[in-house]
Image (spheres, helix red, strand yellow):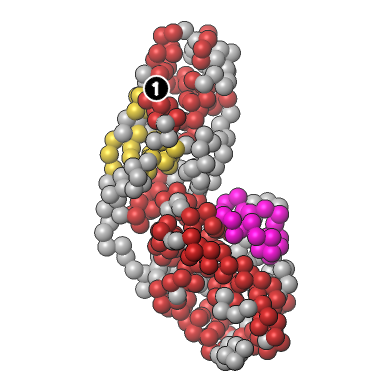
Amino acid sequence: MNDELPIFEIEDDRELPDPDEVPVRDRRVYTQPYDLVVDSLIEQISAKTIFLRPLSDRPDFQRKYVWSDFLASRLIESILLNVPIPPCYLSQNENFELDVIDGQQRIFSIFRFISNQFALQKLEVLKELNDLRFHEIPQKYQRQLKTHTLRCVVITNESHPEIKFDVFERLNSNTVPLNAQELRNCIYRGDLNSLIKKNVEYLPWLSILGKKKPDMRMRDEELVLRFYAFYMSGIQSYRTPQKHWLNDVAKTGQKLSPEQLENLEAAWKNSINVCLTWFDAKTCFRRGTEGKSRVINRTLFDLLMIQASKISVEIAQEKRADFLERFAHLMTDVEFSDLIGRAVDHTRRTKRRFEIWERTFEGIFKNA
């Protein structure tokens, strides 16, 4: 399956501003120059002060190294010719560790060449260096490369986390822009992130997505985070921009105890299993006639998963007929249909959906 295909619906009016959006009060971002000699940069990567994929399992939003030897050779030639190289951006966490946010391909290309992992090719100016590895080029070029200063900028840990997140979005200059969850994985690393990565490998969940493995773009991970956000914080905590609300939960997740994480994992599995008691995998979280949509509706995912988290599989089975009858009736409601298909992230509309849902299923599980 093509991992660029959508896994959830793209709603109408998704770009429409939410009139109830909560602005970030403290819009401060702190940066500092962090120019590094290449030799020192490699030393810090080896010492795990600077983290860079694929030499480390973080930052885990970063994609694989994709530059060809030709592109890497062009970079090395540019450095030797003193052609200006765009700055790299690093993020500093609370432990004063640094993740490479922008510049992964450049830094790793330099690392690969100095490690003799490829020979230069197709150089247009320094043609005499073609087909040579680092240890084979003249000493003066070796010294020039190792003493070259790479321009870097650090976004420090003093920066407001929400603004830091927004800055990462603006810095994101990849051919395929990083989405919010990929960026979130950089800023809010921790046990909750690790749990979410485990959650998306749960086979019943993969059967719902119709996938054999988790989504490469982490869109499925964001759905899990949505569930935990509503599960832990409740609908009353909801605010927009939604990405900032989810960031709050991701940040809270960095400090959860092992017992809390264990409970969250149990809640995830139970909710998925309950939902699969009501629907088969192909119709679960879908809308339309008999769930014919191929992609998930995020609003139905939210509502069904939170409802499911409150009961057991046994109770779900016992009340299945009554539940599905009410669900089918709800799906014909004009107001509800509008609320799950348009401007779905707006605060008032999100809270109204939960209101209608609770009214529809009031009392069904009360004495179960």
The answer to which of 253 and 88 lies nearer the viewer is: 253
Give x and y (percent) for residue 230: 48, 72
- Please give the range of residues in magenta: 197-218
Tell me where residue 131 appears, x and y as whole percent. Answer: 59, 13
- Position of residue 99 measured from the top left corner of the image (x, y, whole percent): 42, 41
Is residue 349 covered in magenta? Answer: no
The residue identified by callout 1 is: 39
Q: Residues within 10 Å of mark 1 (few under 14, many from 20)?
A: some
Q: Is residue 45 left or right of residue 365?
A: left
Q: Is residue 64 above or below residue 204?
A: above
Q: Circle 1 sits in a helix, a strand or a loop, which is it? A: helix
Quarter holding residue 207: bottom right
Residue nearest the viewer, comparing 251 with 74? 251
Q: Nearer the viewer, residue 101 or 191?
A: 191
**Residue shown at the point (30%, 54%) measured from the top left:** 160
Q: Nearer the viewer, residue 56 or 128?
A: 56
Q: Is residue 233 above or below residue 55?
A: below
Expressed as whole percent of the image width and height from the top left, the position of residue 11 reads: 55, 68
Give the position of the C terminus as an image quadrant.
Answer: bottom right
Task: State the residue at coordinates (70%, 57%).
Answer: 211
Would residue 186 be seen by someone viewing this image from the given angle?
Answer: yes
